[in-house]
Image (spheres, rainbow, N blue to C red):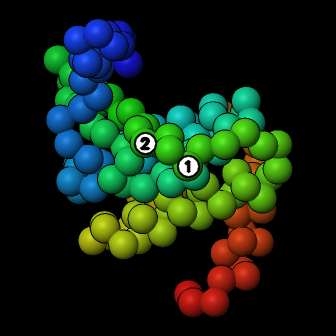
Amino acid sequence: MYDVDVPNATLTLQHVGDRDLAAALDEGAERAAAVGRHLARLHEVGIVHGDPTTRNARVEQRQDGDPRVTLIDFGLAYHTGHVEDHAMDLHVFEGSIRATAADPDPLIEAFEAGYGTVGDEGVLERLRDVEGRGRYR
């Protein structure tokens, strides 16, 4: 958000992508890896997104050819230091990939690798615990 003009009832917002990640999953795993890095940075400062899905990540193809991925919709976000909450963010995103991608496994691998380059390995370990507790696999 760039500006809020209350008297004129207008908001000036930044453009954050041409489409949802859900529509760009078949264009390569780098986008999923970028989401992993973004979530790791948020978790590093104690922020949980709360609803990280392929619909809450926007993709823009930049002029230099590299895609830009932006997380949106922080309406369910909160602050915590609990590893379990961070792992649940990852679990939700991976579930979203499984629900929208034709071949989810390479995307999930890229997502976790992206998270691992920036984030706490303990969160990925806890993710395995969370997955193991699932009722449906």
Query: Gap in Å between the C-alphas at discs 1 and 2?
Result: 8 Å
Task: Give the left or right position of residue 45, taking residue 62 as reference.
Answer: right
Q: Is residue 119 above or below residue 2?
A: below
Q: Position of residue 109 (x, y in %)?
A: 51, 58
For residue 105, say whether it is visible: no
Task: Say which element carries label 1.
Answer: loop
Q: Position of residue 11 (x, y in %)?
A: 28, 18
- The residue positioned 82% from the left and 43% from the top of the image is 81
Q: Which residue sits furthest bottom?
A: 136
In the rendered image, which quarter is residue 22 located in? bottom left
Task: Say which element carries label 2.
Answer: loop
Q: Position of residue 102 (x, y in %)?
A: 27, 71
| Mark 2: amino acid | Asp
Do labels 1 and 2 touch, CB within 8 Å? yes
Task: Give the left or right position of residue 15, taking residue 123 as reference.
Answer: left
Q: Which residue sits furthest front?
A: 7
In the rendered image, which quarter is residue 17 located in? top left
Q: Is residue 43 above or below residue 100?
A: above
In the picture, which quadrant includes the C terminus?
Answer: bottom right
- The residue positioned 78% from the left and 59% from the top of the image is 84
- The residue positioned 66% from the left and 75% from the top of the image is 131
Judging depth in this view, the residue of 84 and 50 nearest the camera is 50
How crowded is the residue under tag 1: few (<14 C-alpha within 10 Å), some, or many (20+)?
few
Residue highlighted by disc 1: 76
In the picture, which quadrant includes the N terminus?
Answer: top left
For residue 41, say whether it is visible: yes
Q: Position of residue 122 (x, y in %)?
A: 81, 51
Please give the label number shown on residue 18.
none
Residue highlighted by disc 2: 73
How crowded is the residue under tag 2: few (<14 C-alpha within 10 Å), some, or many (20+)?
some
| Mark 1: amino acid | Leu
